[in-house]
Image: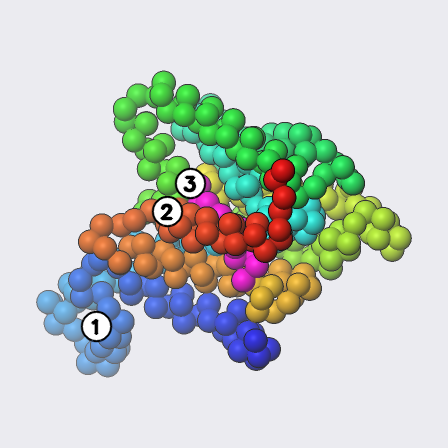
Amino acid sequence: MNRKIANIICYALPVPVLVLSLFIGSSENTDFGTYISLLYKKLSDGLNATETESYNMISNIIWNVRLPRVVLTFLIGAALSTSGTVLQAIFRNPLVDSYVLGISAGAAFGAALSITYGGVPVNIAAFIGGTLAVLATYSMAGSGKQSSIVSIVLAGMVVSGMFTAFLAIVQYISNPYKLQAIVQWTMGNLHAASWIELKQTLIPVIAGLLIVFIYRWRINLLALGDDAAKAVGVNPALDKLILIGCATLMTATTVAAAGIISFYGLFLPHIVRMLIGADNVKAIPGNIFLGGTFLLVIDNFSRSLFAFEVPVGIFTMLLGGPFFIYLMRKNKINWA
């Protein structure tokens, strides 16, 4: 693809999508034209009582309901996409993401325990669960030269299945009110987005993205293997620990805020690489901006395509499942 078009898609598209997303939803009379006309009239001639009531209602919907959801969705998309890129580079495996490695399932189990029994904040419980999952996956698959695409994918699926079973146990013993909340939350829902959720998500995600952005040139070295990284004076073990920790932190934070959004970190990094190349110096910023933008587009469809809101996790699963199969066939994985 033409480099200028790719840069426009990755870096210029987020702004109009962010703005337009504020005016997409089920509420009537909250379209862009109505809001702008009322705003212009307020600044110029002033509004009458009816117009003032309408303007206040629209402003409340846009700034207190839709804005936190739009920003939170963008952050979650950026975090999941960037985490997928980091994990694919570190494990040198195009089929890896936080969902395949079991991080999402582990984080969901930890968060569900916190929701059901309390005692530990949801974000911390999700981080602990996600950390245990990735450690279990990496231990089962082997490390260094012993790991392979097949072993990592299979180990991740086993760990994900185990934590999904643990999550089912928590759901089974929960009371009906908490069970309903957990089931809706595991589908990947953004309907409960608020300023409180945004504040809890903002710092961990921004911190993780910032560290990954600083380390983006080192990710290229890690993708070449430990020997190549050591040859230029990089400590691969320490860098992997930091980057996997950031990916786990961001994934756990997004799971705590919106539930499991499956496969998004799998297919979005590949789309970014198709647009701007495999160089992580450029791909990491591309994943941050395009990852947030694309999830916003999916969320806009999820809350406007039907009369009811469809969980965004269902859309990402429908997109990511076929893409996962395509990648397996493309890489000619032999399961025999």
Residue at 46% from the left image edge and 48% from the top image edge = 321
Q: Quadrant of residue 3?
A: bottom right
Relative image position of residue 247 (x, y in whole percent): 60, 45
Query: Mainly helix, strand or loop, the magenta region?
Result: helix
> Does residue 208 appear in this view?
no
Where disc 3 sits, the SS reads loop
Query: As drawn, is 25 to the left or to the right of 283?
Result: left
Q: Indicate whether residue 264 is drawn in magenta.
A: yes
Query: As drawn, is 129 to the left or to the right of 213?
Result: left
Q: Which residue is mark 2?
A: 314
Sequence-wise, the earlier of marks 3 and 2 is 3
Asked if 143 appears above or below 304 in the picture, the reply is: above
Give the Cα distance between marks 2 and 1: 32 Å
| Span of residues in magenta | 257-271
Disc 3 and disc 1 in contact, CB within 8 angstroms: no
Relative image position of residue 183 (x, y in whole percent): 34, 33
Q: Which residue is mark 3?
A: 259
Residue at 37% from the left image edge and 38% from the top image edge = 185
Where disc 1 sits, the SS reads helix
Q: Of the residues shown, which amino acid type is indicated by label 1?
A: Thr
Residue at the extreme top: 173
Q: Indicate whether residue 24 is drawn in magenta.
A: no
Q: Of the residues shown, which amino acid type is indicated by label 3?
A: Gly
Coloration mode:
rainbow
Asked if 161 appears above or below 11 in the picture, the reply is: above
Q: Which residue is mark 1?
A: 34
Give the Cα distance between marks 3 and 1: 34 Å
Q: Quadrant of residue 134?
A: top right
Relative image position of residue 169 (x, y in whole percent): 41, 21
Residue at 56% from the left image edge and 63% from the top image edge = 272
Q: Of the residues shown, which amino acid type is indicated by label 2?
A: Ile
